[in-house]
Image (cartoon, grey):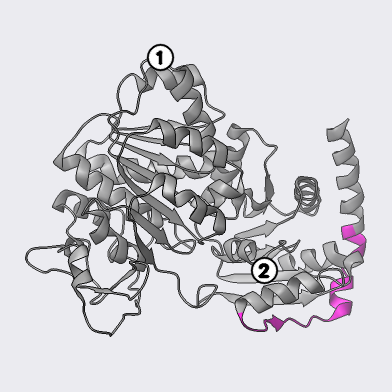
């Protein structure tokens, strides 16, 4: 897959409501005086869908300078979430956007903010809150890239970077602040002179994950500090936790859903291997050997397993690097950069990397360990062209739940056992070497 900065965004077919057009249409924006995009209101919950899918960002009413930035970055045609949400966002309406991983959510909220800033520039105009430092850094890069032609400055507030240096840069009054909740609250409470009293826009990005990571109490404190403003909430799913947060952060929001009825992207090839638990490592090595050279993410359930598999793979001559929560911020960024640049083609990851990260050209996703729920499964496989899950005798109940959530039975891959077992000796040696190295790390 391509990164958000480079991808050629293809036309998305948006299902439309063909019922009568009511007066609710007036709540939506006239997007362009020359070629207005018409919105067809749905019957409930203030949800809207595009009636005639726009062909360009210019059709959405975005300023010409920002359209040029889109074309420079390879954004040629709005995605479904962009086409549906940007016209509403340009009207300064509170907005809830639901769309799957890789759908272009970031540009869907960054472009309206930049549009407003160009028309009425001011320091500390907008705040974007992200659940992890990695995602915040990625969002900051999108802001900088799209805002380069209109001289927009942003500041990144995340853990792992020096707080004093961040405080100094805050004194320069950037236009947009991209932050994780904990570090943002640290600055609001401790950095002299830093205030968001004039804030005009707030974005809660990956809101379901923000709340899954138990940032709820911190968000409550932040929301009490912020003034009245326009708020955009974007998420891959709408959960009960998000619903309970809405009254505190949004006012009469319009809901936009660009999620398809399919639980995973239509082009994704999904299959599984039903294997004995004792030979799990061997089946993994056979699968990687059959797909040598492909860019792949291998998901594990625990940090310990992530580290062990990474070491085992290196002993077998694979170019692998781990990504998990116990790495320092600089180590995480180094791992991501090595994978993006292709110097390592296998990323062994816990679910810290399952969503939102800017990881281009992923050919394959392997679920070495199955996730505990279908939502995490969907997020994991959302970046790959092919997804293969290793299912052991202990995983049947979880796998059946995942298939039920997807609404279909997935294909079981049949391998020749003798071919797989041919790797047993080499895998055994690498396993023992990994155990010794893991022991040294713990000691």
Over which residues does the magenta segment extend? 407-427
* Residue under the image location 89 percent in, 78 percent down: 418
Relative to the observer, which residue lies in front, 20 or 185? Answer: 20
* In-front residue for pair 337/130: 130
- Residue 386 appears in the rendering: yes
Between residue 346 and residue 273, name the one nearer to us: 273
Residue placed under numbered mark 1 in the picture:
192
Residue labelled with disc 2:
291
Q: Is residue 348 left or right of residue 238?
A: right
Q: Is residue 421 magenta?
A: yes
Query: Crowding near pointer 1: few (<14 within 10 Å), some, many (20+)?
Result: few
Residue 285, x across and y down, in percent: 78, 64
Q: Left or right: where does residue 152 sit relative to residue 203?
A: left
The x, y position of residue 316, in whole percent, is: 80, 54
Image height of 195 relative to 175, above or below:
above
- Residue 28 at least partly seen: no
Q: Is residue 174 above or below residue 316?
A: above
Is residue 12 shown above or below 166? Answer: below
CB under 8 Å between discs 2 and 1: no
Q: Residue at x 70, y 64 (%)?
A: 367
Q: Nearer the viewer, mark 2 or mark 1?
A: 1
The answer to which quarter of the image holds residue 123 is top left
- In the rendered image, residue 64, in percent from the top left (x then y), is placed at 14, 53
| In this view, 100 is above or below 415 | above
**Dividing the picture into quarters, in which one does residue 75 lie?**
bottom left
Please give the name of the residue rendered at 38% of the width and 60% of the height, measured from the top-left corner: 7
Q: Secondary structure at mark 1?
A: loop
Distance Cα–Cα, label 2 vs label 1: 55 Å
Q: What is the crowding at mark 2: few (fewer than 14 residues within 10 Å), some, or many (at least 20)?
A: few
Q: Is residue 46 magenta?
A: no
Residue furthest left in the image: 34
Tell whether 61 sits left or right of 215.
left
């Amino acid at each position: 897959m391509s990164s958000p900065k480079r991808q050629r965004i293809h036309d998305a077919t948006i299902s439309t409501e063909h019922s009568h057009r009511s007066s609710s249409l007036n709540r939506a924006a006239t997007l362009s005086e020359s070629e207005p995009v018409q919105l067809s209101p749905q019957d409930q919950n203030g949800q809207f869908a595009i009636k005639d899918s726009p062909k360009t960002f210019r059709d959405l009413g975005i300023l010409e300078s920002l359209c040029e930035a889109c074309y420079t970055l390879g954004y040629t045609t709005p995605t479904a979430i962009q086409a549906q949400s940007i016209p509403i966002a340009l009207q300064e309406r509170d907005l809830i956007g639901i769309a799957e991983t890789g759908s272009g959510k970031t540009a869907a909220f960054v472009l309206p903010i930049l549009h407003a800033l160009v028309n009425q520039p001011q320091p500390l105009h907008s705040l974007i809150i992200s659940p992890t430092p990695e995602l915040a850094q990625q969002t900051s890069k999108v802001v900088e890239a799209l805002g380069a032609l209109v001289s927009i400055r942003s500041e990144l507030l995340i853990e792992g970077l020096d707080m004093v240096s961040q405080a100094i840069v805050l004194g320069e009054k950037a236009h947009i602040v991209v932050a994780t909740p904990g570090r943002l609250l640290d600055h609001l409470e401790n950095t002299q002179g830093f205030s968001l009293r004039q804030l005009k826009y707030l974005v809660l990005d990956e809101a379901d994950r923000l709340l899954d990571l138990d940032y709820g109490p911190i968000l409550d404190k932040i929301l009490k500090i912020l003034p009245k403003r326009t708020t955009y909430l974007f998420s891959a799913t709408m959960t009960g936790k998000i619903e309970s947060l809405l009254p505190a952060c949004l006012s009469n929001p319009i809901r936009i859903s660009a999620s398809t009825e399919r639980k995973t992207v239509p082009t994704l090839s999904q299959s599984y291997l039903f294997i004995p638990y004792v030979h799990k490592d061997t089946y993994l090595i056979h699968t990687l050997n059959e797909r040598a050279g492909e860019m792949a993410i291998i998901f594990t359930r625990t940090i310990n397993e992530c580290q062990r598999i990474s070491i085992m793979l290196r002993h077998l001559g694979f170019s692998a690097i781990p990504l998990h929560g116990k790495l320092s911020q600089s180590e995480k960024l180094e791992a991501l950069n090595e994978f993006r640049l292709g110097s390592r083609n296998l990323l062994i990851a816990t679910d810290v990397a399952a969503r939102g990260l800017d990881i281009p050209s992923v050919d394959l996703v392997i679920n070495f360990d199955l996730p505990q729920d279908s939502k995490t499964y969907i997020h994991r496989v959302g970046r790959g062209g092919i997804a293969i899950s290793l299912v052991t005798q202990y995983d049947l109940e979880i796998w059946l739940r995942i298939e039920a959530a997807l609404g279909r039975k997935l294909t079981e891959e049949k391998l020749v056992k003798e071919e797989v077992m041919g790797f047993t000796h080499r895998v055994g040696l690498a396993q023992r070497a990994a155990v010794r190295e893991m022991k040294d790390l713990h000691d």
